[in-house]
Amino acid sequence: MTNTEARSLAAACASEMFERDQASRRMGMRLLAAGPGSAQVGMSVREDMIQGHGTCHGGYLFALADSAFAFACNSYNEATVAIGCSIDYVAPARLGDTLTAQAIEQSRSGRTGNYDVRIENQHGQLIALFHGKSYKVRGTVLAQENPDE
């Protein structure tokens, strides 16, 4: 597969997954980019995302990173799920911030992969670091054409 074909496949997989992902869309996430083993997702911090200390609830930050991770690890058209994730909150996200989560594949071998996600605000300030481990299951992201038809 050429680099151009791999990039096209990754974009198609991310687009298909994003269309089916009601949770990410309802949180206001935007799929910004996708490539082989990578994805970039954006989200603006809304008033309903603010917790008791006046900053963005960590669950929303985790969800943003997890979505970017999902699009990155499914970019090869092989159905892949998370088997473990962790996050470190570095700085608070505030009302009105525009966040970007950039997922990058660190390793992929056999059925497992490791991905790091960096969340930054609109000023390039680091907000959180996330690590996810993926596991390839049966199936594909994109519908397969039936060669017998």
Image (cartoon, rainbow, N blue to C red):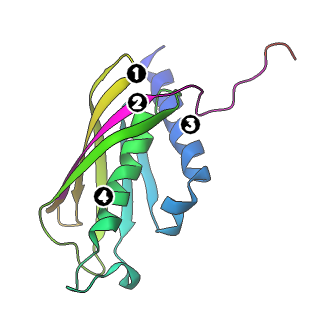
Number of disc labels: 4
Residue under pointer 3: 12
Asked if residue 134 lies in the magenta stretch, the reply is yes
Report helix, strand or loop for mark 3. helix
What residue is rendered at 36% in x and 78% in y? 49
Which circle's residue, 2 or 4, is located before the other in the chain? 4
Residue under pointer 2: 135
Q: Is residue 111 visible?
A: yes
Q: CA distance from mark 2 to mark 3?
A: 20 Å
Relative to 1, say whether 51 is above or below.
below
Residue under pointer 4: 100
Report helix, strand or loop for mark 4. strand
Q: CA distance from mark 4 to mark 3?
A: 20 Å
What residue is rendered at 12% in x and 67% in y? 91
Crowd band around label 3 with a 10 angstrom C-alpha radius: few (<14), some (14–19), many (20+): some
Query: Is 15 on the left or on the right of 98, as rendered?
Result: right
Depth check, mark 4 against mark 1: the one in front is 1
- Magenta span of residues: 128-146
Relative to 138, say whether 12 is above or below.
below
Tell whether label 3 touches label 4 (CB within 8 Å). no
Residue pushed farthest front? 83
Report helix, strand or loop for mark 2. strand
